[in-house]
Image: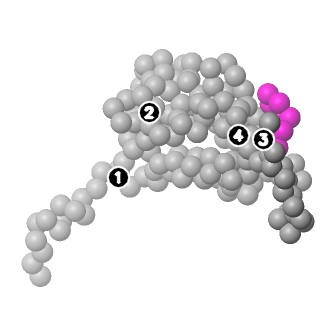
Amino acid sequence: FLIKSEMIDGLIKQSPDLRNRTIMNFDVNDVEKLEVEHLERSVVVEKKSGVWELTVPILAKADEAKIDEILNQLRGLYAGETVLDKSKDMAIYGLASPHVKIVISLKGSEARTLLIGKPVGKGIYVKTEPAGSVYTVAVDIIYYFTRGWLGFRDKQMMEFRKEDVKRIDLRRK
């Protein structure tokens, strides 16, 4: 048989090309708590009786859809490039004092931690703790964690079923 050289070139892979690029592997349904530290401010949301609640810095109902979106973004986070650093100097990546620290507590498992460092090109440096590698990921992940606690709070003003509404009065003062 004769095979075109282009086909063979496509089959040749380096070991980094064969690695699983998933950075945080967890089941979203197993998450019990999400902690985010950004600029020395903390936000904590916890799942209590199947409902997400904001517990730090205030007690309030959390935005269920937003928490699910954030967790799915973290679960689907893929490494663009694996940085092999022998010096262990995390300051050059902005990870000695990370811009954002995220801790995910899981049922029956140890917590997963992700540190987000400084931007590089179209990406941003991240590291898993305690002994993870340094990776680059798409920079847009930072958006979810730099909005403060209001980004996690439920924005619904009132809770009611539309079937129960008989009349709505709007008055202008």
Q: CA distance from mark 1 to mark 4?
A: 36 Å
Kindly identify the residue that appears in the image at 53 percent across and 31 percent down. 116
| Disc 3 versus disc 2: nearer the observer | 3
Quick one: label 3 or label 4, which is nearer the N terminus?
A: 4
112 sits to left or right of 156: left
Which one is in front, 106 or 2? 106
Specify the label residue 17 is tagged with.
1
Q: CA distance from mark 3 to mark 2?
A: 49 Å
Q: Main secondary structure of the magenta part?
A: strand
Quadrant of the image containing the N terminus: bottom left
The residue under label 1 is which amino acid type? Asp
Q: Is residue 40 visible?
A: yes
Which one is in front, 104 or 48? 48
Residues rendered magenta in the picture: 53-61
Query: Which residue is the site of mark 4?
Result: 152
Kindly identify the residue that appears in the image at 76 percent across and 35 percent down. 44
Query: Which residue is the site of mark 2?
Result: 124
Q: Residues within 10 Å of mark 4 (few under 14, many from 20)?
A: many
The residue under label 3 is which amino acid type? Arg
